[in-house]
Image (cartoon, grey):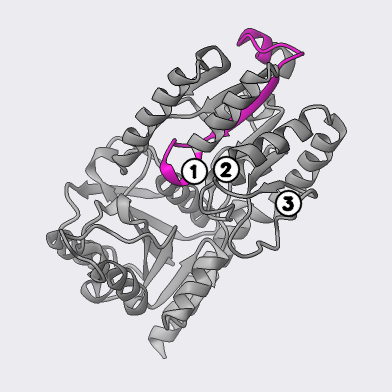
Amino acid sequence: MRIGIVTGEFPPLHGGVGDYSHELAKALAALGAEVHVMTDRRCAGLHSSDFTLHPFVKHWSFFSLWKIRQWARQLQLDVLNVQYQAAAFGLGAPIHFLPEAVGLPTVITFHDLRVPYLFPKAGRWREWAVTHLAQSAAGVITTDPADEAELKRRGVTNVLQIPIGSNIPVQPPAGYERAAWRERHHIFASDFLLGYFGFLNHSKGGDTLIKALATLHDRQARVKLVLIGGQAGSSDSTDIEFGAQIEKMITRYGLENRIIRTGFVAAEEVSAWLLACDVVTLPYRDGVSLRRGSLMAALAHGCAIISTQPPSPVTELRDNENIRLVPPDSSEVLVLAITGLLNAPEFRARLGAAARLTAQQFGWGAIAKRTLEFFRAVQSLRNV
């Protein structure tokens, strides 16, 4: 099967959508598919034996739709898969008309349902654009059950929910020893290390975490925080603005000596830091969900995780069994949860072991298999 993946992000650009697209392309190729990836021209130079990269888009314009149509015809693609997140396509309108323009079965993978900017005073047209993209596609994949339910409510029928996987393998640098790694970075046995993985954008609740750390600091708890990864992604300028607010908070609360910033580092170092943490804190403002790559990485590494209660239950995540859940936007309750785990190593170990077990159902091989089966089903409907 010849598959085309259209994505606004792809390595070396930083972003969860790009990482997902990269892992999916490799996993689909491992199942025997011929995979072509069309993306931003800034990704030129990346080479892979698993798939073919076509980095020719300068701006996501209506002209891009024509280019994608020509590209798909030349390659005789069987199905086109758009990895959709509004920011990854410049928050503009053109990508929302791709299924009608391209002339072959198109499947949209929604990483979230956040609306694009489109143009000033677009108002209700913003949600309409997302709904139109879903309704005009031959099939839709969501990465979160809540998004699946919302699209069905909007009248989209051919929808399948497939969770994402971890883009960080459990593979620290050769010779890794947890105690030695911590000591090298001035984290000692008496220190309790909190971890936060991912960009410091508004939806991830980094400000709530900083307020909680400030309270713990005032109480003289021996707690440190490592911010794993870069501050901002390649697609969303608001990450930079929110990151600047976080830096001001850190200075105002006098937390500079409590925080370690890794910046963008190789996957091996991310793995090492996740393994070095006592607890990983992911206080998402919109609640924990299966579309979060940072959550999937923490699960895969067997971390004791504190996150936030989702709007509706996520059956795979159970409070006090494989995760600790607290209300969003409450630094006070977050402090209580951290304090509760601080002197409970056996509880942390149980949470971590259960998290690792949970992660087994989100492997990339299983994700690619379900995705490929859906592509074939969509193609067969087209041929009826």
> At which x and y percent is residue 238?
32, 41
Instruction: Name the quarter where the N terminus is drawn.
Output: bottom left
Mark 2 in CB contact with mark 1 (< 8 angstroms): yes
Q: Residue at x 31, y 51 (%)?
A: 87
What span is in magenta? 181-205
Give the labeled residue for mark 1.
204
> At which x and y percent is residue 138?
38, 78
Give the labeled residue for mark 3.
358
Mark 3 in CB contact with mark 1 (< 8 angstroms): no
Amino acid tagged 2: Pro
Give the labeled residue for mark 2.
283
Q: Nearer the viewer, residue 292 or 99?
A: 292
Q: Residue at x 56, y 34 (%)?
A: 209
- First in residue order: circle 2 vs circle 1: 1
Q: Residue at x 77, y 33 (%)?
A: 341
> At which x and y percent is residue 378?
45, 78
Q: Nearer the viewer, residue 112 or 281?
A: 281
Residue 328 appears anywhere in the view: yes
CA–CA distance in space, label 2 to label 3:
19 Å
In the picture, measured across the screen, residue 64 lies left or right of residue 364, that is left
Local secondary structure at mark 3? helix
Amino acid tagged 1: Lys
- First in residue order: circle 3 vs circle 1: 1
Q: Residue at x 38, y 39 (%)?
A: 11
Estimate how packed mark 1 is, as few (under 14), some (14 to 19) or many (20 or more) residues with alpha carbons within 10 Å.
Answer: many
CA–CA distance in space, label 3 to label 1:
22 Å
